């Protein structure tokens, strides 16, 4: 079946450091890939997505590239800010249809220190 | 911007009691989901709901669980007789053709 393996946290970085959170997946066919973010006290928010191989999703300075050859979708940001402190979830969906269930990783808690 | 709301934010209950978790999805959305996350584990799909009936459910969603949309706005998840292992964060999602919008979650603690 489909599964997502995500880098274990927690991750603590200083402000302006480079961020990478690793995510690999197992799926048949051509899934869509997502990063969701959960800020304290809030729901899961879509951060970025990619729907086919070699697509790059980007938002708020975060990027992730859909790599089919390595089955990966690593999240990166060049210079993190304190406001990026949150829990980050990698997820996949079997197709591009929104009404299909998401398969999530365990989440990575990121803390940025000023 | 429309958002999904969930109540309560935290529910503490004793083992064997019934609980109802409530969600108000985004109006005019037609698909609704419940997911849960046991502390330190993955977010897991529980059930999807469309046109007033369950469209898919996971192995977790046994006879102790039920969902309904009682009044056209609320979407509820009921656990009939809670167990310790039901302690988790429960997320509701309201779905369009392309994206799932999540609520803030209800933390359920079973003692």
Image (tube, rainbow, N blue to C red):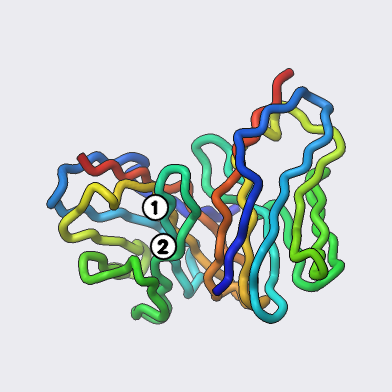
Residue B14 picture location, percent across and down: 16, 43
Query: Looking at the image, which residue sits at the far left?
Result: B16
Residue A104 in the figure: left or right of residue A47: left
- Chain letter for mark 1: B
Specify whether A81 is left or right of B24: right
Residue B8 location (% of width, % of height): 32, 44
Q: Chain of mark 2?
A: B
Could you say which is closer to the camera, residue B63 or residue A96? B63
Which mark, residue B90? Answer: 1
Q: Quadrant of the C terminus of chain B?
A: top left
Q: Secondary structure at mark 2?
A: strand
Mark toward the start of the polypeptide (1 vs 2): 2
Residue at the image position 25 percent from the left and 65 percent from the top? B65
Residue under label 2, please give it. Answer: B34
- Name the residue at the front extreme: A70
Verify CB contact (< 8 Å) between mark 1 and mark 2.
yes
Front residue (pair A98, A76): A76
Residue at image x 86%, y 67%? Answer: A54
Please tell me whether residue B45 is drawn above or below residue B85 in the rendered image: below
Res A111 quadrant in image: top right
User: Callout 1 environment at 10 Å: few (<14), some (14 to 19), or many (20+)?
Assistant: many
> What residue do we see at 76% from left, 29% from top?
A81
Q: Residues within 10 Å of mark 2 (few under 14, many from 20)?
A: many
- Which of these two is toward me, B102 or A18? A18
Identify the residue shown where x is 66% and y is 64%: A25
Q: Where residue B35 sits: x, y (%)?
A: 43, 60
* Distance from the alpha carbon under mark 1 to that under mark 2: 7 Å
Label 1, secondary structure: give it: strand
């Amino acid at each position: 079946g489909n599964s997502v393996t995500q880098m274990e946290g927690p991750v603590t970085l200083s402000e302006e450091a480079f961020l990478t959170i690793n995510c690999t997946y197992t799926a048949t066919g051509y899934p869509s890939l997502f990063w969701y973010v959960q800020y304290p006290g809030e729901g899961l928010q879509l951060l970025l997505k990619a729907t086919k191989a070699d697509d790059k999703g980007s938002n708020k300075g975060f990027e992730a590239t859909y790599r089919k050859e390595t089955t990966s979708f690593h999240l990166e940001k060049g210079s993190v800010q304190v406001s990026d402190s949150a829990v980050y979830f990698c997820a996949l969906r079997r197709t591009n249809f929104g009404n299909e269930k998401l398969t999530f990783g365990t989440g990575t808690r990121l803390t940025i220190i000023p | 911007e429309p958002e999904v709301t969930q109540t309560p934010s935290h529910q503490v209950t004793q083992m064997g009691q019934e609980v109802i978790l409530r969600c108000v999805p985004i109006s005019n959305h037609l698909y609704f989901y419940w997911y849960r996350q046991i502390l330190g584990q993955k977010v897991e799909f529980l059930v999807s709901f469309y046109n007033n009936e369950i469209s898919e459910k996971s192995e977790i969603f046994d006879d102790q669980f039920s969902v309904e949309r009682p009044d056209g706005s609320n979407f509820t998840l009921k656990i009939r007789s809670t167990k310790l292992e039901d302690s988790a964060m429960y997320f509701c999602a309201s779905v369009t053709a392309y994206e799932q919008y999540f609520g803030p979650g209800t933390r359920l603690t079973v003692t």
